[in-house]
Structure formats: structure tokens, C-alpha cells
Image (cartoon, helix red, strand yellow):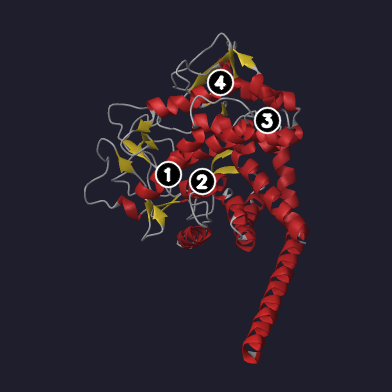
Amino acid sequence: MKIRLLGVLIFLCLFYLSANAQVKDKSALAGSILADSRLDTIQARGLKLLSGFSAGTSYNEVWIRDFNTFIKGSLKVHPKEKVKEMLLMFFKIQGDDGNIVDGVVDSARAGVGYQYRYSKLLPGWAAHKNTVETDQESSLIQAVKKYIDVTGDRSILFEVIGAKTVLQRIEDAFAYIQKDRWSAKYGLVTGATTIDWGDVQPETGWGVAINDKTKWAIDIYDNAMYVIAIHDFMAMKPQGYQTKQNWTTIANTIKTNVRKHLWMTSAQKYRPHIYMNGSPFSKDFNEDEILYSGGSICAILAGFNTPAEVKEINKQLLAAAAKDKYATIGKTVYPAYPAAQFPNMHPYIYQNAGDWTWFGGRMIAALIANGQAKEAYQELIPMVDRAIAHKGFYEWYDVQTGAPKGSGDFRGEAGVLFDAITVLKQWAIKNK
């Protein structure tokens, strides 16, 4: 009995010492985060850039997938009424079937080769939709939730646009996905074959639009974004509001089907695609070996993975980044698609193994939510240092040379870094 009691006491002492050490470690980490002036520098520079709404210097449009990632920063520098107005534009030009466009642009500047859409509800503006994507609807709904989180202004949900409230239009957007971008066989969201979250098909030509070469597929990104949007809608809808469908059940079913069909347990990663009408790639090409960073990160944010799986995914992202001198966890894929398989985007170009803080930065909140604050800070810093070194925010970076590429003044990078640093600082304040 005495021996057993002694053993219990020793265990309790060791447990206390371990717990106390963890608290001290957290406190030290929190102190380092709060004292890091680089984080303040990036947030200040980011807010200065977020005085505008277009995606960057290469774009005239306000893209909803971009706006969704910098709306919190926008609300720091704009009156909430202005930001609300920008969000409502996307509902004013919503399709009759519920679909949401990609971008809206001043009609006088609508000069790119898109098929533009117009609406009497939005005079003076044109809009277009990259039809290969299936994230516009989800992005808008998520952006509305962020707007409410920051402002507390739920009146946006009751705005009437063309005889419908925003609440009704949100459900119309969900229903569009269920009708037009849905696989009944797998119970999952579908879209055209692109690289992870990308908007370009493999075949040469105008790759952003559905065409006769399109290969329909299921991927993790579209499904994760849809489920995040459902969670957001259920959290912001008024109590007592009767939804058209049981969206919570739909979200839970998608998670189950993602785990069944897309998650590869032995590899601890997501399968890039499940094909509906054949693959665009040659039979000897093993696409399942490719790691998708952005979709995996969004899956974590959607709650699809356990903390242990999150650690393994993060380990794989770090290993992929280590393959190239200038890469971070924002490197889109590893390995890159060979040019022979993806002629519309060669290796290390743009979405084919370019490095995008726009997605890598989202991993910071995912890591913190899964008890990995130390890793979050360590993995954020290379992205922060890069932005400081280049004195600005860029669309993507070349992992082989480190050179900034694509659009300058890229608000997606600025917004994601602003949000990541905010979450990191919030953790630090609680644990200092």
C-alpha cells in the first residue's frame, strides 16, 4: 500500500513539474511573439494596402475569393457601411440559379476576355465567373460571417435584394452547389480539374472556363470551403430561422464522405482528385503522390482532421518546403505537375508549385487551434520576413529563386498575414 501511494505521489510530482514547465514554455513563447516588432510592421503595412478592394495591381476586379481573406483588415480601415456595400454587390448580381460570381468590376474597366454578366440591381458594374471553380459561393458566405464577427452588424442578413433577403440568397447559393456541382454517387462537391484551389485547367487555352475538354472531379478544397461556409451560416443565422435544408446534416455527411473517399489513411494525406468522367492525365502518372497544401489547410479549418493528423500534415508541408531553397509551407504542391501532364501551367509557375502566402498563412490559425502555437510562430516567420525583405505584398514567389511574382500589392497576402498575426497575438495575450 505504501509503495503504491509513493508511486502515485511520484507520478503527481512529475505531472506537476511537466505541467509547470509547459506553462513556462508557453509564457516564454508568448513573450517572444508580443515583443516581435516584425509582426507589428507587417500588420501596419497590410492595413495601409487594404485601403482598396481590388485584388492587386494586376487586377481591376474585386474578387470574392480574395475579399474573403482580407475583409477583416478592410474593416479596420473602412467604415462598415462601405465594406457591407461591397459584399452586397455580389448578391445583387447573383445568378437566378443561386450561383455567385468571381469578380465585380467597373463596367468601363471590363476589358479582359471574360463573359461578363450585368444586373439592373447593380448599374455601372460588370461581373464574371471562372466556371472551373467551386468556391465563390462558399467564399461570399464566409465573408459575410467575418463581417458580422467584426462589426456585430447582423442587419446585413435582412437586407432585401430583388425581393429576397440575404439569408434567402445564401441558401440559394448553397442550393446551387447541391444542384449544379454535386456528385450523388460520392455525396461530395464537384468542380473542374485544377491544381488544388487553382482556377486553371490542364489543357492549353482559356483555362478558367468549362469547355469540351473539362474533366469533372472531386477535390478536398471545394468540399472544405463548402463545409466551412455551412458552419458559418449556422453560426450567424437568427435563432428560430427555419432553413430550407438541414445544412448541419449535410456538412456532417460531407465530412464522413471526405474521410471515406479523399483521405488516404496510410499516407496521411488527401487524394488530389476523384474523377467523374475520366482523368486528363496519362495512365502512368500517379497523381495520388502529389501533396496539396491549400486544400489540406482548408480541410483542417473545416474540422476534418484530428490533432494527430494535423501534426502529420504539417510535417509533410514542412518536408515539401525543404525541397526548395526559398519555399515555405505556402508552396502549392509537391511534387509539381510535369509540363507534359499540365501544359497550361509548367512546373514552378503560378499555382504549379509556386509559393503562396495567401494559403500558407491560413495554416497559422489551423495550427493554433490544434495546440501547435510554437510551430505556428516558427512557420509564420519565413513568410513575414519575405514580405519585409521585398517591401510589399505579392501574389506568389518563385521557390527556386525567391523572386516575387504575379501581382504586386496583393491584398490576399496582406489580409492573410494580418489575420494570422492577429490570431497569434491573441494566443500570446492569453498565455503570457
The residue located at (65%, 20%) in the rendering is 158
> Dot 4: few (<14), some (14–19), or many (≥20) neighbours within 10 Å?
some
Q: Where 6 falls versus 300 (above or below)?
A: below
**Residue, disc 3:** 52
Q: Position of residue 211 (x, y in %)?
A: 32, 26
Query: Gap in Å between the C-alphas at discs 3 and 4?
Result: 29 Å
Query: Gap in Å between the C-alphas at discs 1 and 3?
Result: 31 Å
What kind of residue is marked 4?
Answer: Gln
- Check whether the beta carbons of the residues at disc 1 and disc 4 lie within 8 A of each other: no
Q: Earlier in the sequence, mark 1 or mark 2?
A: 1
**Residue, disc 1:** 220
> Dot 3: few (<14), some (14–19), or many (≥20) neighbours within 10 Å?
some
What kind of residue is marked 1?
Answer: Ile
The residue located at (74%, 67%) in the rendering is 28
Query: Gap in Å between the C-alphas at discs 2 and 3?
Result: 26 Å
**Residue, disc 2:** 298
Residue 256 visible in image: yes
What kind of residue is marked 2?
Answer: Cys
Question: Would you say 304 lies left or right of 16 here?
Answer: left
Q: Quadrant of residue 240?
A: top right
Residue furthest top as drawn: 120
The residue located at (77%, 63%) in the rendering is 31
The mark closer to the camera, 1 or 3, is 1
**Residue, disc 4:** 168
Q: Earlier in the sequence, mark 2 or mark 3?
A: 3
Quadrant position of the N terminus in the picture:
bottom right
Question: Would you say 249 lies left or right of 407 here?
Answer: left
Q: Secondary structure at mark 2?
A: helix
- Check whether the beta carbons of the residues at disc 1 and disc 2 lie within 8 A of each other: yes
Q: Where 248 falls versus 419 (above or below)?
A: above
The mark closer to the camera, 3 or 4, is 4
Q: Earlier in the sequence, mark 1 or mark 4?
A: 4
